[in-house]
Image (cartoon, helix red, strand yellow):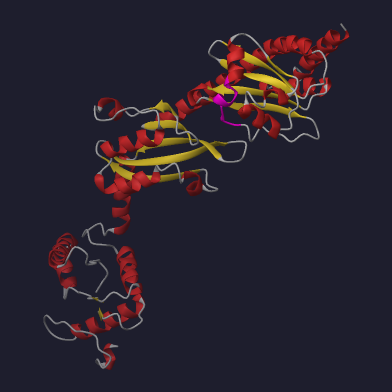
Amino acid sequence: MEQIIKYELIINKALRSALEYDKPDEQINEFIRFFGQHIGSDRFYIFEDDIKNHATDNTYEWCANDVTPQINELQQVDMDIIEWWYQSFDKGENIMITDIESIKEIHPLSYDILKMQNVVNLAVSPLRYKDQIRGFFGVDNPPMGDFKRLSEFLDMIGTLLISLLKLRNSFHKANESARLSSYSALAQIYLTMYLVDIKDGTYYTIKRSEHIDKSGNIYLLDNFPKQIATVMKNLCEEKFLKDVLSFIDTDTLEERLGEKNTIEDEFIGKVSGWCRQRFIKVDHDADGNLHHVLYCIEGIDAEKQRESKLRYLSETDRMTGLYNRGCGERKIIKAIKNNSKGFLCLIDCDKFKKINDTYGHAVGDQVIIAVAQALKKSCREHDIVLRLGGAFSDGDEALTFDQLYRYADSAMYHSKKVFGYHATIYEKDIDPEAK
């Protein structure tokens, strides 16, 4: 009777202590801490089954001060090791071992794993609620006494733990729904968005491009790396595919992200035109490793067109369509730095002022445009043709653009002293006055 009252008091106090906390995870940890500590056991733990992988995980654990925690080691434990426990659970029975030496011969795998944890005796009870909760909980090395009474109170604790676990699941589900709802709002600017679990490759589709739904060649798979690779092989232009597949490799993602919150890559899609794919950090696991990320694709074809137009306007002389001085000068400086061999030629239209004075500036502009078109037709695609005002470098001499321009200007000055059409190549012994 005294033992019954003791357990009842501990359970009531443990529950009241747990309810002092707001979050379900905190409540569960406090409940097992209070109960385990006050009955004088070494360890109180909860395991939850991963049916898909036929394994069980230690999800909550309390240990006495001088006991080594096992929660990190006891993850994805093969259920076959304690298959006989599950057989008892299916019958509605608890596992009560008063001396583990008694199972050494009949259950050697169970014996070895318990012996490794310095377990002498234990009491374990199942956790079952529909298809939502499945596992077990127990205490290691409880005080020797009436194990039958302890078993009965474990059943009572089981009901309370299931209630706390149900609250936890509802809490997590509500948080997840709220998070996915916020992602859904963000997804409006994207063609595609997935929430990806980096650890196991599973993913949740927040938004999927209509191109995927309409394409009969794209199969929907449960594994993100395989799914997105399938999509890209169908929808990405061939010349971008190698880089795109490298970008979506989740095995190297954490290293590539480093301290950054996001990384991005651009490619051309067969249907959408220019696209930008992006990974965004969401959270890390308890060990600090990357856990979830968002993978997004946005259409940037219009953005690319604007960029192209702005670049053209910033680099081009409006009247002639040639490079303007700033752009042309930068390209020539880059060629000089690369020690490229080339020929810098300044061309001047003789007597051009007379055209403007006689026929007006509108006709003068047409002459400039005609000269520019003639130059463009006479030059190769990679040549730099710019509207500047007017040399020749073999790349052997270290030159700046300003020096090169002065040489060309000196040669052009010498040409202008000669009547009619004339071209001068700069040399060091050129007419001193031309220098």
Q: Residue at x 27, y 58 (%)?
A: 316
Q: Residue at x 55, y 24 (%)?
A: 80
Q: Residue at x 31, y 83 (%)?
A: 396
Is residue 237 visible in this depiction of the protein? yes
Q: Position of residue 191 (x, y in %)?
A: 36, 32
Given the current orientation, which residue lies at the most extreme top position? Answer: 1
Q: Could you tell whether 254 is left or right of 25 in the image?
A: left
Q: Position of residue 399 (x, y in %)?
A: 35, 80
Q: In front: 284, or 74?
A: 74
Q: Residue at x 64, y 35 (%)?
A: 72
Given the current orientation, which residue lies at the most extreme right position? Answer: 2
If the image is split into quadrants, where does the C terminus sit? bottom left
If the image is split into quadrants, where does the N terminus sit? top right
Q: Position of residue 123 (x, y in %)?
A: 72, 18
Magenta stretch, residue numbers: 75-83
Instruction: Decide: is 313 above or below 138.
Output: below
Q: In front: 334, or 44?
A: 44
Instruction: Decide: is 254 above or below 322.
Output: above
Q: In front: 143, or 290?
A: 143
Quarter holding residue 190: top left
